[in-house]
Image (cartoon, rainbow, N blue to C red):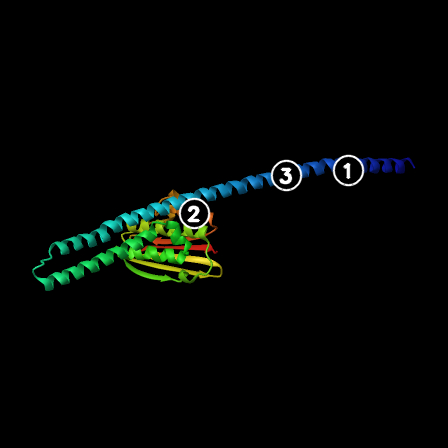
Amino acid sequence: MQNETAKIAILVAIATLIFLLMPVFLILYIRSYNRHKKNHFVEKQLMQETFSAEMLKAKVEVQDQTMQSIATDLHDNVGQLLSLTTLTLNSVNLNDTEKAAKKIENSLSLVNKSIKELRELAKLLHGEQLVSEGIGYAIEQEVNWLSKSGVFQLKVQNELTRLEHFSPDKDLIILRLMQEIINNIIKHAQATHIEINAYLENDKLFLNIAEDGVGFDYDNAKKNNTGMGLSSIRKRMEMINGKLMLNSTVGQGTSISLEIPYP
């Protein structure tokens, strides 16, 4: 009987202890939950601030790239056209009406070309405007500027001009990624051929850029965070949950593939 009473007393004590500890555990759980929730909110806010900072940086870099393109084109294209116009007009001999009329006609044609070039440049003054018309259009404009250099043989397949839905924030970063890759090809690759392939498949945007330049040791570059701005490119890809695939062989060129959830 005493054993039974002792057992009951122990069970009552345990039940009482559990009953008393339950509120403590509940309070600790709520505090832990609130702490994790607060930390999650802070992390989310920090990620948003980081994303906003990267967006601002991308906008500034796109504007810088745009201004460089404009300066180059003003000097190389518009400047040359206007200089040629001036030379043509200065050579007009009003006494020879037939030749004078032909030269004036040629001058008008050169002026019209200059106006057309200036209109194209005016569009580029608004880097974000390029993106607002879709990433396909922005890529097309980049390819146009690249082809004007006459340095590379280009093979381009751009299916993104058909997109009906855009993602302006992502598009700006994608444009900057493409510009960064192209700039590094121009500066370091010593390539003669560039192949660009852009398309959308299964809600993912793919941008593949390959060239036949000098190539580099990818594993060593990845280890030391060098080579074609890999660190910056990887960082931007992480911002938009993208995947970066790069293959390079010394003496045989480099190919870069970007895979990005879209839109």
Foreground residue among 32 and 104: 104
Residue 15 visible in the snapshot: yes
Residue at x 72% of width, y 35% of height? 24
Badge 3 amino acid: Asn
Residue at x 30% of width, y 55% of height? 119
Query: Residue farthest to the bottom?
Result: 98
Badge 2 amino acid: Arg
Instruction: Tell me the tag on residue 236.
Output: 2
Distance between the Cα atoms at labels 1 and 2? Answer: 52 Å
Query: Residue farthest to the left?
Result: 95
Q: Which mark is first along the chain, 2 or 1? A: 1
Label 1 Cα neighbours within 10 Å, binned few <14 / some 14-19 / many ≥20: few
| Horizontal and vertical percent position of residue 57 | 40, 43
Residue 136 found in image quarter: bottom left
Q: Is residue 44 left or right of residue 150?
A: right
Residues at marks 3 and 1 touching, judged by CB atoms closer than 8 Å? no
Residues at marks 3 and 2 touching, judged by CB atoms closer than 8 Å? no
Badge 1 amino acid: Ile
Residue at x 24% of width, y 58% of height? 113
Q: Which image quadrant: the N terminus?
A: top right
Q: Is residue 128 left or right of residue 46?
A: left
Label 2 Cα neighbours within 10 Å, binned few <14 / some 14-19 / many ≥20: many
Label 3 Cα neighbours within 10 Å, binned few <14 / some 14-19 / many ≥20: few
Distance between the Cα atoms at labels 3 and 1? Answer: 24 Å
Q: Which residue is mark 3?
A: 34
